[in-house]
Image (spheres, rainbow, N blue to C red):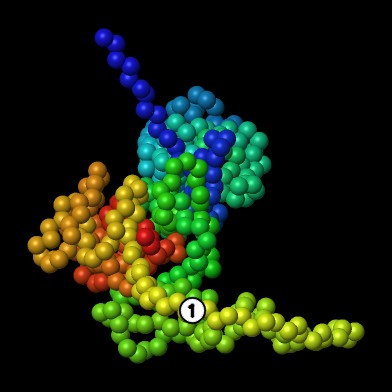
Amino acid sequence: MIWDIAEQKSTIEGLDAEGRPDPAYAQALGLLRAPFGRRALAFAVDVGIWAVLALPLLIGAVPLVAKLATGAISPYGFLNHPDFLLAAVTAGVSTLLGVVYLVVQLILHGVKGVTIGKAAAGIRSVNVRTLERPRVGAVFVRFVLLIASGIIPLLGPAFLLVSPTFDPEGRGRGLHDKATGVWLVDVRRGLNPYDQKRMRVARKVVKAEPTRGRSALPSLATPADPDAQPEYRPAGRVSAGVIGMARPHDARDRPAIGLATAAPAATPLEVQPGTPVLGGYREIVQGQEPTDAAALPTARDTESAPAGALGSDPAPDSVPEPPLAREPEPERAREPERAREPARAAVFGLVFDSGERIAIDGAVLLGRNPDAADHAGARAVALADDSRSLSKTHLLVRSVADGVEITDCGSTNGSGLIRAGTEYAVVAGTPILTTEGDSVRLGDRVAAVVRL
C-alpha cells in the first residue's frame, strides 16, 4: 500500500497579494525601523573594534613596508632587516584576530541578528519577509557587497551607506539590504523580534480582525495615544470579535495598572472623587450633563406641529387656509397596557485566538487545569496550551455590570490588559475591570472581551 503524505508548507504571515512583505503588518506588530543615527553608531563601533585589532599590523609591519615601497630598502634588505621578524609576527597576529573577529561577527549577525555594534546601539537585523533571523549566507553577501562598493573609492561605499535614507517604503533599507532581504529594526522603542514569547502574542493579536466602528475607550490608566498605529487587517481567516492591533513590549516597559474602569464618551471626562463602586472602582462621569430627551421634539411632534412652530417664518404670499371640519371619531376601547419587560442585563464573554467562546455569566476560573477549591462558586474551564505558557490556575474572570473583572492568580508568565494598542501588566491579586473592545493576555493566549 502506498501512502500519500501531504507536504505541510509553512505559511508566511504579513505578505501582500503579490507575495511581498507588507510594511503595515510589521508596523502593527510594533516593529520600528532602526534610526539612521544609531545605525551609524553601530557601524562605527564595528569598524573601531577592527581598527584596534589591526594596531599590531599598523605599528610593527606598516613602517617596514613603507620603506620597501619608497625604495629606502631593497627586497633583499627587506627580508634581512632586523625588524622583519617583528613585522611578520605583528602582521600574523592582526590577520588572525581580524579573521576570527569577522567570522564571529558574521555568525552572530546571521543567527542572532546582532553584531557588537548593533548590540550597543539597540539594533537587530531580521529577514524582511519572515521577520526571523537573516541567516549567515545573507549577511555574508551583504558584507561582500559593502566591500565590493570600494571599487569606486570613497564614492561607492558612501553611496551604499547613504542609500537607506531614500527607501520609498520608509523602512530605511539600503541597496545592500534589499539585495539580501535584510531589515534593521529598533529594539529599544519597538518590539524585539527575537523575543519569541512577545512575537507570538503580537502575531496572534494582529492575526485577528479588529472590531469595526468601535471608538477608543478612554481610561484613567490608558491615556489617548495620538501616535497610535493603524490597525492591520490581514487577508484570510479571522476570528470574529477579536481586536486586531497591539504593540507588546517588555514587561519592564509596560506600566502596571491597578483598579481602573473605562466608559466610552465623546466629551472630556472628569473623575469625581466620590463614591467608590464595584469593589474599589471609581465612578467616571461626563463633564457635561446630557440633554433631557423629553425636551426635544420628536418626529411625530414635528409632523403635527403647525407651520412656524419650529421657528421658520411662513411664506409672505401664502394665506393660511381654515382647517376642515372633521366628524368626531368614535372612541376606541382602550387596550390594557402591557407590562414592559425589564431590560436584559448585558452578558459579556471572551473570544480566544483559537475561536473558542466562553460566556462569563458568573465567576470563571481559567488555566491549564484550574482548581476551583479556593474559589467558591467559580466554574473551572481548562484551556488548550501547547506552548505551556499557562499556569495550572491562571486567571479568575468575573462578570460585573460594566464588563468583565479579571484577577491574576499569581501565574508564572503573568497576564496583561491590551487596550488601545498598548499592553498593561496586571498585578497579581488585583482585580481589573475590562470592557468591550479590550483584550486579555494569559501567557501566550489572547482573548477579546465582547458583548454577547
Residue drawn at 70 percent across, 82 percent down: 326
Query: Helix, strand, or loop for circle 1?
Result: loop
Task: Please name the residue shown 51% across and 81% down the image.
Answer: 268
Looking at the picture, how far across and down is residue 298, in whole percent?
60, 79
Front residue of this view, candidates 230 and 212: 212
Q: Position of residue 442 (x, y in %)?
A: 28, 56
Task: Work out whether residue 92 or residue 405 is closer to the camera in this orientation and state it.
Answer: 405
- Quadrant where the C terminus sits is bottom left
Residue 289 place in picture, x, y as percent? 50, 87
The amino acid sitting under disc 1 is Ala
Please say if 349 is above or below 433: above
What residue is at 47 percent from the left and 79 percent from the top? 334
- Say if 171 sits above or below 292 in the image: above
Q: Which residue is mark 1?
A: 333
Q: In the rendered view of the protein, which quadrant contains the N terminus?
A: top left
Dividing the picture into quadrants, the one containing residue 372 is: bottom left
| Horizontal arrangement in the rendering, residue 8 relative to residue 379 (left or right) | right
**Residue density around tag 1, few if under 14, some if 14–19, many if 20 or more, within 10 Å:** few
The percent coordinates of residue 221 (x first, y second) are 39, 74
Depth check: 143 or 69 in front?
A: 143
Residue extending furthest toward the left: 373
Residue drawn at point x = 87 percent, y = 83 percent: 318
Residue 434, visible in the rendered structure: no
